[in-house]
């Protein structure tokens, strides 16, 4: 009688090798698909935050919400409360309940009441706020920038307080995916060819933003120096020392500067 024939060791090794090759081919594709899915969720979060931002403005005669996270401007309550720990720059975090309470105490909460919308799915574990607001959008007047040291008229001209002040709303960034929680808002030099806050490298060597007209989009960085520096300083703030040396790196910085300070229209040397 014929006995059942088993696989030989060589046949098993061949099968394992084929599976390993297929996995090596498929894994990058699977990782890319997973990242694209998370990017889509992030873009939707940003769009929902923008919807809340617009509804707030419509309820307050087009006055936009205080974008200086954690800091009230007189009677203007910040869009979210203080969500960061004192050692935030080295990765410290507040207790989760404190973060949730800070978000719910913000001025935007009545218009955006889903706590999950305040965090990108690729954000750091244990943090509930990964989005920040651009400096110019009724946010923090950074010391040393023209709007932080100039006469009151200059400050009022550069800091947007009302939607009717916004030129080219489809190109003016309001929210950015920072990937972690930090104080204040996203700072951008107006008069220097230098990054203030570090470039945000998220979702495959770019960043996600939402603009004043309500749409959200993904920006792909062009400069390798932008990407390299941003990767090295994820959740480790450098203090804004990157000075682009390549035309591509300068173009990346210019795009962010223009999205913040449109009225000044900075140039690339």
Image: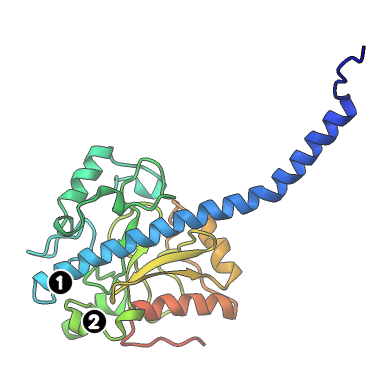
165 left or right of 256 in image: left
SS class, disc 1: helix
Q: Answer with mark 1 or mark 2, whichever residue precedes in sequence.
A: 1
> Percent x, y for residue 209?
38, 67
Crowd tier of the residue under label 1, counting other residues whose Cα lies within 10 Å: few below 14, some 14–19, many 20 or above = some
**Residue at mark 1:** 57
Q: Residue furthest left?
A: 75
- Reading the image, the residue beneath label 2 is 150
| Disc number placed over residue 169 in the picture, else none | none
Residue at position x 38%, y 53% in the image:
120
**Residue at 29% across, 41% down:** 94
Q: Is residue 219 visible?
A: yes
Q: Quadrant of residue 15?
A: top right
Number of labels in the image equals: 2
128 w.r.t. 10: above or below: below
Tell me residue 180's x, y (percent). Answer: 38, 52
């Amino acid at each position: 009688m014929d006995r059942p024939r088993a696989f030989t060791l060589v046949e098993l090794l061949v099968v394992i090798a084929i599976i390993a090759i297929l996995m090596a081919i498929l894994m990058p594709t699977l990782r890319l698909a997973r990242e694209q899915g998370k990017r889509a969720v992030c873009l939707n979060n940003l769009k929902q935050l923008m919807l809340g931002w617009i509804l707030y403005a419509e309820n307050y005669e087009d006055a936009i919400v205080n974008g200086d996270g954690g800091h009230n401007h007189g009677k203007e309550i910040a869009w979210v409360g203080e969500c960061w720990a004192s050692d935030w720059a080295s990765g410290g975090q507040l207790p989760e309940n404190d973060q949730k309470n800070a978000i719910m105490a913000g001025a935007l909460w009545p218009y955006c009441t889903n706590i999950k919308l305040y965090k990108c799915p690729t954000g750091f574990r244990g943090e509930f706020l990964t989005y920040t607001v651009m400096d110019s959008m009724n946010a923090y007047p950074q010391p040393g920038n023209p709007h932080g040291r100039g006469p009151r008229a200059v400050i009022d001209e550069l800091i947007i307080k009302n939607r009717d002040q916004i030129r080219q709303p489809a190109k003016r960034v309001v929210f950015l995916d920072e990937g972690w929680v930090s104080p204040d808002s996203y700072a951008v030099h107006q008069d220097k060819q230098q990054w203030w806050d570090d470039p945000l490298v998220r979702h495959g060597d770019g960043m996600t933003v939402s603009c004043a007209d309500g749409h959200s989009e993904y920006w792909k960085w062009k400069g390798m120096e932008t990407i390299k520096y941003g990767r090295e300083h994820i959740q480790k703030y450098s203090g804004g020392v990157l000075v682009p040396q390549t035309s591509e790196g300068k173009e990346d910085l210019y795009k962010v500067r223009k999205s913040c300070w449109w009225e000044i229209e900075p140039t690339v040397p």
